[in-house]
Image: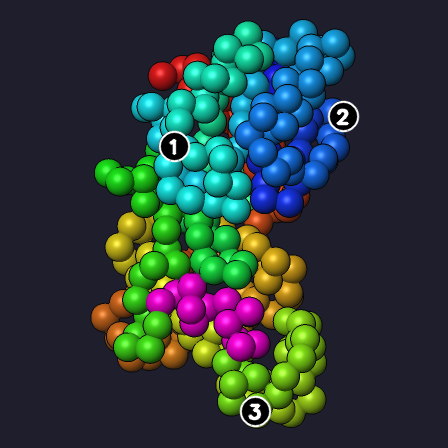
Amino acid sequence: MAPLGLIDIGGTSIKFAIWQDATLMSHHAIETPTTKAAFMDLLQREVNAMKAQADIVGVGISSPGSVNKATGVIEGASAIPYIHNFPIQAELTALFNLPVSMENDANCAALAEATTGAGRGAASLAFLVIGTGVGGALIFNHQIWHGAHLFGGEFGYTKIDATGTLSELGTVPNAIRRYQEMTGQTGALSGQQLYQLADAGDIAARHEIETMYDALAQGIFNLQYSFDPEKIILGGGVSNNPDLIPGIQRALAGIYEQVEIATLKPELALCQYTDEANLRGAAVDFEQSRQV
């Protein structure tokens, strides 16, 4: 595979790297500009620097928002409003004088995991990104399933019960919020501290953590029986917690006791790549885009 330039656009920083021999070279990050003009100038300078280092044949980009592969427009919304709703892919192609591919960041992470990461060898998988909300991606036959309206993988919108969605019930920040509302406590509280409180016997902390696991288990159960992926990969900050999969498995056991007819158990795995996933997936997307 010829060298590629890679860009991962984030709300706080933009990461750059050269993809050569299945390795990220010259990997670094720069603070995200506040204007479109400064953004375009930064990307042009960085790609020119990549050209000086390697004979790159194109640029693969991971981006927030709903990337419309047919139009080259980033639809939806994100923390970077100036990248949306104009033909950004065409403008960058002209700016770089190189072929450009673009894909949503969660989809890129899923492609990385499916190709050489935790989902390697699986033709289909669901990838859940568990952060401030729950996002993710679906892959069938090694390709992203975007959906008719670019909502494929937006698992966080799914209703879990009468009280909320998967994003509202299945994340650590919301577990912290519920705990503080229940106890009347104020001030900063981290996820690690919430787990420490639970381990120390705090009933309210344990209740909110189990609520989170119950919500994730219900979402995963529904995903398995709706789409039947070979694997379900879990990513996001909470994936660093060794209790995540055991906690979800405990909650799944309760579901299978209730739904006796259900015998198919999801194969869960933690993501292999962390801060490299989006860049690696952008390289996969570039190669797949050239084959279309």
Q: How far is the residue under mark 1 from the one under mark 3?
A: 43 Å
Earlier in the chain: of badge 1 and badge 3, it is: 1
Q: Earlier in the sequence, mark 3 or mark 2?
A: 2
Asked if residue 219 is among those painted magenta in the image, a careful observer would answer no
Q: Nearer the viewer, residue 68 or 281?
A: 68
Q: Position of residue 292 (x, y in %)?
A: 36, 16
- The residue beneath circle 1 is 85
Q: Circle 3 sits on which residue?
A: 183
Q: Nearer the viewer, mark 1 or mark 3?
A: 1
Q: Is residue 127 left or right of residue 40?
A: left
Q: Position of residue 99 (x, y in %)?
A: 50, 12
Q: Secondary structure at mark 2?
A: strand
Query: Can residue 180 be seen from the camera position used here?
Result: yes
Do callouts 1 and 2 mark residues in contact (Cβ within 8 Å)? no
Tell me where residue 230 appears, x and y as whole percent. Answer: 39, 47
Within 10 Å of disc 3 (Cα), the crowding (few <14, some 14-19, many 20+) is: few
Marker disc for residue 285: none
CA neighbours of label 2 inside 10 A, class few (<14), some (14 to 19), many (20+)? few
Q: Amino acid at mark 2?
A: Ser
Q: Amino acid at mark 3?
A: Thr
Q: Secondary structure at mark 1?
A: loop
Residue 119 visible to an observer of this rendering: no
Q: Which residue is mark 2?
A: 26
Q: Which residues are magenta?
A: 165-177
Question: Predominant secondary structure in magenta?
Answer: helix
